[in-house]
Image (cartoon, rainbow, N blue to C red):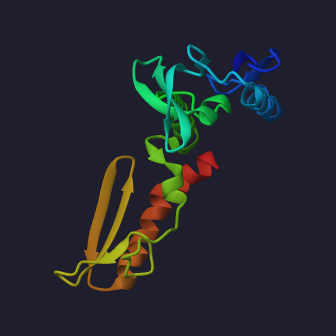
Amino acid sequence: MYAHICKNCEKQFKNYKKDAVYCSNECRLEQVKKVLSSKQKNITGQKFGRLTALYSKSINKRYSWLCKCDCGNEVWVTTASLINGHTQSCGCLNKDFIKNNANKILNNYRKENFKENTSLSNIKSQTLFKNNSSGRRGVYQRTSTKKWIAKISFQGKTYSKSFDKKEDAIKCREEWEEKYFKPILEKYN
């Protein structure tokens, strides 16, 4: 959470966005009405998130502003998008947010789902691949040899064995699941 001061009411508020501008949607709308109703619409030099308005011109019957972003890029933005807070950067804000939060999300996922070098969500899953011909996860028929293959991956190792009969491959896969998956699932569930 980041601490901010509302651009409209000047009250302090907290928000998960680093460059939040308004404490509420009501404040945002009130500020838009103030700016649009005033006769002076010159926002040259004003800052909107990471953008600073430099100068305006009419593009497709709308006023747009050439803005300089804190990162150095320049971008054209409509007056309304600046005032209502819809556009706050050249795109770098979103990239930074993803970059900074992707690691947090990924680390939380790893803490919850990876135990002993094994993805718990993968070994719990019973989802079949689209091209599965056996009806059983980890069992497929090799087209070149017409043999049935039982395959399982666990803690970075892959085990596979071929069979003439599909039933034997399924039985082997089930035995491997019992041997490898069951103990770790019981331990962490």
* Residue 29 sits in quarter: top right
Compared with residue 48, is residue 84 higher up or lower down, i.e. above or below? below
> In front here: 130 or 87?
87
* Residue 19 sits in quarter: top right
Judge left or right: residue 142 versus residue 89: left
Judge left or right: residue 150 versus residue 32: left
> In front here: 116 or 59?
59
Q: Position of residue 187 (x, y in %)?
A: 60, 47
How many marks are shown on the rendered structure?
A: 0
Q: Is residue 94 visible?
A: no
Residue occupying image coordinates x 37% and y 61%:
152
Q: Position of residue 146 (x, y in %)?
A: 22, 84
Q: Is residue 54 visible?
A: yes
Residue occupying image coordinates x 46% and y 59%:
179
* Residue 46 sits in quarter: top right
Image quadrant where one finds the N terminus? top right
Compared with residue 40, is residue 129 higher up or lower down, i.e. above or below? below
Residue occupying image coordinates x 39% and y 69%:
138
Q: Which residue appears farthest toward the left when viewing the image?
A: 144
Q: Position of residue 75 (x, y in %)?
A: 44, 29
Judge left or right: residue 68 versus residue 21: left
Q: Position of residue 68 (x, y in %)?
A: 46, 20
Compared with residue 177, is residue 91 higher up or lower down, i.e. above or below? above
